[in-house]
Image: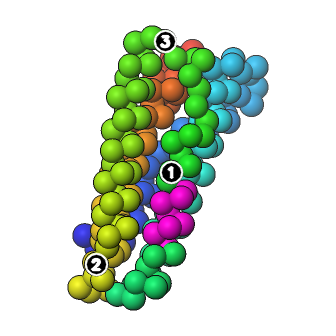
Amino acid sequence: MEETKKVAVQATAIQVYREQRDGAVVYMKDTKPSVEQVLYYQELLYRIAILETIQALYKATPKTVDGNVLVPHYQLLEAFITCLIGERKLSGLVTKDDKKAQETALNSLNLILDHGKKKFLSYAPPESEEQYRNDIFNFIETVLIAWVQYRNTMVNVSTIQDDVEAKIA
């Protein structure tokens, strides 16, 4: 996949969340928001910030085969992604059925991270300057899919957006 297409995939997700955020801002401008609407809004802000940071880390991916340059980049990326698992847990707002889905999603995310750690901690020097970038992109893409599924077990922004739009209509 070409470089611009890779960045565009992440930019599309950010754009969707920005559009949802902008809609929430318009709605809340003249309306006293409910707790759920504030939760929805803060979740959008959070996801935008995470995706922008991930996008910046991807853009900063070195084009080299020098392991001394690649290791610090991976360590920063891995530390950031690992922190995503433990922050902003909203377990008090989750039903028993949702807790099972949340546990499953968290286990999947942890498996992906463990696989990534094993792969990149034993990473052989890449054959080309693009190999590490491609491998990192694939890792990020897989993590983000699992992370969004995990976040949706706590705050499913699609469902809440549908509720907000129904109240506006």
Q: Position of residue 74 (x, y in %)?
A: 46, 69
Label 3 vs label 1: CA separation? 25 Å
Between disc 2 and disc 1, the foreground one is 2
Q: Classify mark 3: helix, strand or loop.
A: loop
**In this view, 49 is above or below 78:** above
| Left or right: 30, with 5 as reference point | right
Disc 3 residue type (three-letter): Thr
Label 1 element class: helix
Residue 124: mark in rendering = 2
Within 10 Å of disc 2 (Cα), the crowding (few <14, some 14-19, many 20+) is few
Q: Position of residue 140 (x, y in %)?
A: 39, 58
Q: Is residue 78 magenta?
A: yes
Which mark lies nearer to you, 2 or 3? Answer: 2
Mainly helix, strand or loop, the magenta region? Answer: helix
Q: Which residue is mark 1?
A: 82
Question: Which quarter of the rendering shows the N terminus?
Answer: bottom left
User: What residue lies at 38% left-to-right and 19% top-to-bottom?
Assistant: 100
Q: Which residue is mark 3?
A: 95
- In the rendered image, the vertical position of residue 167 relative to residue 122, given as above or below: above
4 vs 132, nearest the viewer: 132
- In front here: 141 or 26? 141
